[in-house]
Image (tube, rainbow, N blue to C red):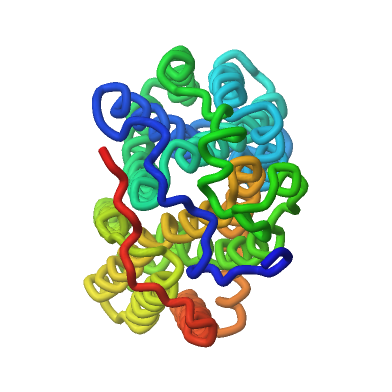
């Protein structure tokens, strides 16, 4: 009924209608490749220059405060992305996904390569902040377009693929940055120019989904808090589903801390166990990263609604954290990290698919922006939360254990909520015709 808030799994804003674009053929392959490549650009910004930070530190050693400012060049894009993603989402809905994506992709190259010519550390940090602005637009547009182009299981599949590509690209970009950095700390910044290759391809290969707003999608989707049979003018006046998005965004903020713990803290946990060999630490981190990819692959193969799975996925993450917190050897720590990362590989696309299911076309950009802000905000505070927990319990392993306990409690709460609402729906999502 109007004004009611549907239970998450029982009445998601998702349409069983066929995908509005082809899901096979060369055009489809190019479209998916471009969306995945665009989704990797923010990852490029996050890790590419990490290997050259020591060289940057040496170059700007005479600059007051360089010890704190140089690392800021690495982290400021992520902070800008977290703060600006909601605004990018509003712009996406008003200006159009494709137009903003192309403009942001071109600007990404301009701001990303700016340190090649800048001699001021302050100027470089400012350029990096602007990179974060473009990343907010790119990530929001790419994710929104996946929601526009696909529905049902196809949407789940490509949101999971987005997670897989992002996880795998982080390792590739880290290696690439290290190799390019051997020729000088400025050299890796040339890689940002790759977006100039993507922009014209996006112009030619990405269809504009704006036409769906008025026709194909509006009647097909059950709009939040407004019945599908309502007149068009009533649907147009419907409110943004703040209540539903607040819940999934809060869960995403917590999920991001769960997701980011192993990548950030694995080396410190190994060091606490006496493992100081960088090769061993790198191998352990790579194994955990591969587990994240395998979790995303598993999610993509499942044909069930994401909401009922969230409790089970968080429980898997909690088990992994529990093993890690109790580990007294490196192999056991790696086993716990693998279990956790299989869970986080499923967690991210499950959260994102759940958020998408609550959004109609007209709201999808704004909703995606809010989700991005919640996720990257959770990533930003993750190290701070664990640091605070470490000071309370007396060790990093203990802090990880506390986070695992919190994940278990959240999982139990989600399971209880689904059972109370009678919303657990084991039926598979509708198939999309090829």
Residue 122 falls in image quadrant: top right
On the rendered image, what quadrant is the C terminus found in?
top left
**x 45%, y 79%: residue:** 404
Residue 74 pos. (x, y %): 56, 39
**x 37%, y 27%: residue:** 31
The answer to whether 329 is drawn above or below residue 261 in the figure is below
Q: Between residues 5 and 262, which one lies in front from this camera angle?
A: 5
Number of marks in the rendered image: 0
Q: Between residues 139 and 49, which one lies in front from this camera angle?
A: 139
Residue 91 pos. (x, y %): 70, 33
On the rendered image, what quadrant is the N terminus found in?
bottom right
Residue 383 falls in image quadrant: bottom right
Residue 14 pos. (x, y %): 49, 53
**x 51%, y 36%: residue:** 216
The answer to whether 193 is drawn above or below residue 156 in the figure is above
**x 61%, y 37%: residue:** 136
Q: Would you say 408 lies left or right of 66 here?
A: left
Residue 36 pos. (x, y %): 39, 35
Residue 80 falls in image quadrant: top right
User: Would you say residue 392 is visible in this rendering?
Assistant: yes
Q: Between residues 245 and 431, which one lies in front from this camera angle?
A: 431
User: Would you say residue 112 is visible in this rendering?
Assistant: no
Q: Between residues 43 and 124, which one lies in front from this camera angle?
A: 43
């Amino acid at each position: 009924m109007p004004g009611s808030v549907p239970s998450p799994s029982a009445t998601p804003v998702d349409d069983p209608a066929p995908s509005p674009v082809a899901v096979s053929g060369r055009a489809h392959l190019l479209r998916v490749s471009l969306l995945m490549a665009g989704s990797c650009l923010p990852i490029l910004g996050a890790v590419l220059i990490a290997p050259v930070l020591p060289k940057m530190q040496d170059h700007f050693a005479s600059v007051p405060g360089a010890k704190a400012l140089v690392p800021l060049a690495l982290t400021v894009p992520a902070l800008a992305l977290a703060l600006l993603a909601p605004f990018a989402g509003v712009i996406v809905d008003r200006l159009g996904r494709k137009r903003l994506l192309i403009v942001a992709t071109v600007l990404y190259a301009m701001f990303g390569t700016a340190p090649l010519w800048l001699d001021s550390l302050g100027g470089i940090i400012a350029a990096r902040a602007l990179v974060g602005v473009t990343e907010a637009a790119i990530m929001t547009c790419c994710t929104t377009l996946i929601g526009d182009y696909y529905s049902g299981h196809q949407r789940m599949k490509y949101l999971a693929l987005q997670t897989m590509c992002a996880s795998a690209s982080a390792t590739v970009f880290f290696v690439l940055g290290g190799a390019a950095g051997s020729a000088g700390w400025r050299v890796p910044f040339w890689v940002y120019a790759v977006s100039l290759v993507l922009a014209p391809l996006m112009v030619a290969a990405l269809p504009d989904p704006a036409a769906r707003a008025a026709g194909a999608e509006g009647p097909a989707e059950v709009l939040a808090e407004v019945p599908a049979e309502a007149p068009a003018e009533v649907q147009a006046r419907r409110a943004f589903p703040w209540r539903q998005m607040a819940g999934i965004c809060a869960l995403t903020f917590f999920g991001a801390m769960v997701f980011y713990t192993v990548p950030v803290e694995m080396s410190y946990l190994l060091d606490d166990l006496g493992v100081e060999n960088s090769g061993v630490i790198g191998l352990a981190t790579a194994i955990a990263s591969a587990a994240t990819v395998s979790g995303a692959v598993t999610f993509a193969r499942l044909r069930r609604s994401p909401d009922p799975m969230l409790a089970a996925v968080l429980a898997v993450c909690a088990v992994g954290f529990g093993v890690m917190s109790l580990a007294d050897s490196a192999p056991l720590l790696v086993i716990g990290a693998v279990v956790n990362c299989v869970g986080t590989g499923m967690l991210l696309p499950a959260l994102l698919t759940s958020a998408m299911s609550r959004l109609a076309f007209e709201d999808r950009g704004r909703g995606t922006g809010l989700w991005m802000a919640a996720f990257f905000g959770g990533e930003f505070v993750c190290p701070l939360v664990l640091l605070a927990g470490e000071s309370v319990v007396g060790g990093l392993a203990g802090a990880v254990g506390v986070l695992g306990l919190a994940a278990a409690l959240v999982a139990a709460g989600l399971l209880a909520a689904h059972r109370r609402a009678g919303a657990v729906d084991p039926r598979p999502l509708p198939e999309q015709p090829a």
